[in-house]
Amino acid sequence: MAEKSMFLVDIDKVVREKAGKKADRIPRFLISYLKRIVHQDEINAFLTRVADKTGVDFLEACVEYLDIRLEVEGIENLPAEGLCTFVSNHPLGGQDGIALGYILGKHYGGRIKYLVNDLLMNLHGLAPLCIPINKTGSQSRDFPAMVEAGFRSDAHIIMFPAGICSRRQHGVIKDLPWKKTFVTKSVEAHRDVVPVHFEGRNSNFFYNLANACKFLGIKFNIAMLYLADEMYKNRHKTFRVAIGKPIPWQTFDKSKTPAEWADYVRELVYKL
């Protein structure tokens, strides 16, 4: 059963779907290069090996495979009652999401949901923990309904409000401005917000590529193709995760706009 529903990375298929009849004109060396930077063979071998694992068990298998070591501070700040929205900076684009889901999933007995881009919904092991958000094309018409479903669920929500992983700007590696959704929806659903800071960084190559694409006005997120490669570069590392004190939802009043409150929480995260 798991085998049939299991997603495997298939660059040849993706190229055929995206390029159509022009796919045959793409040089084989370029296809081979893409397979190498997305680590197609290694990832598929891992996914096949853990095809029977889902949810937090799948995240635990990922933590072991990537040899992620975690130094968690502020575990006492995790609320024992009520449902929360956990918001974190997004420095890596791989290990940070896996680690945060693993920490919170273990603590809350699997009662967590990610708001993630719909590409990750293809991962059989991760799908039960996801409320999908379409980030790859035009926003889905179902976007508000999906977010609503997440916040009305009986699970804690994990969000990376920047939407994409951190970039280097003026020599500083930091998230782009945070979207306000977590503020407005947490208020509506009466969920306290728990700030989390994840310490880590990608390679200089990654940041230089992202900035070059921005400078050249390339709208497609080419840097995203290299996130798997960055994930492998970050294997066997120790990451500090700092959990801040919950912010009561009543805090987010009319004294600031939701966007200003989002920026306020973002700055709090970087002080943890």
Image: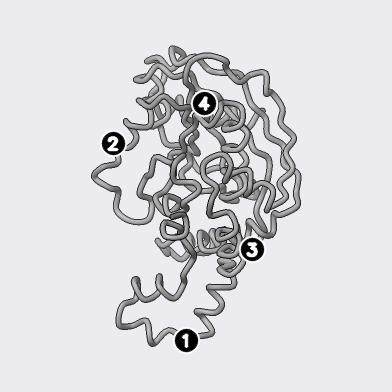
Element class at badge 2: helix
Label 1 sits on residue: 27
Element class at badge 3: helix
Q: CA distance from mark 2 to mark 1?
A: 41 Å
Query: Is 60 placed left or right of 183 in the picture?
Result: right
Label 2 sits on residue: 144
Callout 2–callout 1 Cβ contact below 8 Å: no
Question: Which one is in front in this view, the residue at disc 4 or the one at disc 2?
Answer: 2
Residue 144 in percent (x, y) is at: 28, 36
State which tag comes first along the sequence, 4 or 3.
3
Quadrant for the C terminus in the image: top right
> Which quadrant of the structure image shows residue 33?
bottom right
State which tag comes first along the sequence, 4 or 2.
2
Element class at badge 1: loop
Residue at image x 33%, y 56%?
137
Q: What's under tag 1, amino acid-wise?
A: Pro
From the viewer's side, name the closer residue of 162 and 208.
Answer: 162
Q: Is residue 245 above or below residue 202?
A: above
Any part of residue 91 in sight: yes
From the viewer's side, name the closer residue of 206 and 114.
Answer: 114
Question: Which one is in front in this view, the residue at disc 4 or the one at disc 1?
Answer: 1
Q: Is residue 266 above or below residue 34?
A: above
From the viewer's side, name the closer residue of 215 and 14.
Answer: 14
Q: What's under tag 4, amino acid-wise?
A: Tyr
Label 3 sits on residue: 205
Instruction: Tally the marks.
Output: 4
Q: CA distance from mark 4 to mark 3?
A: 30 Å
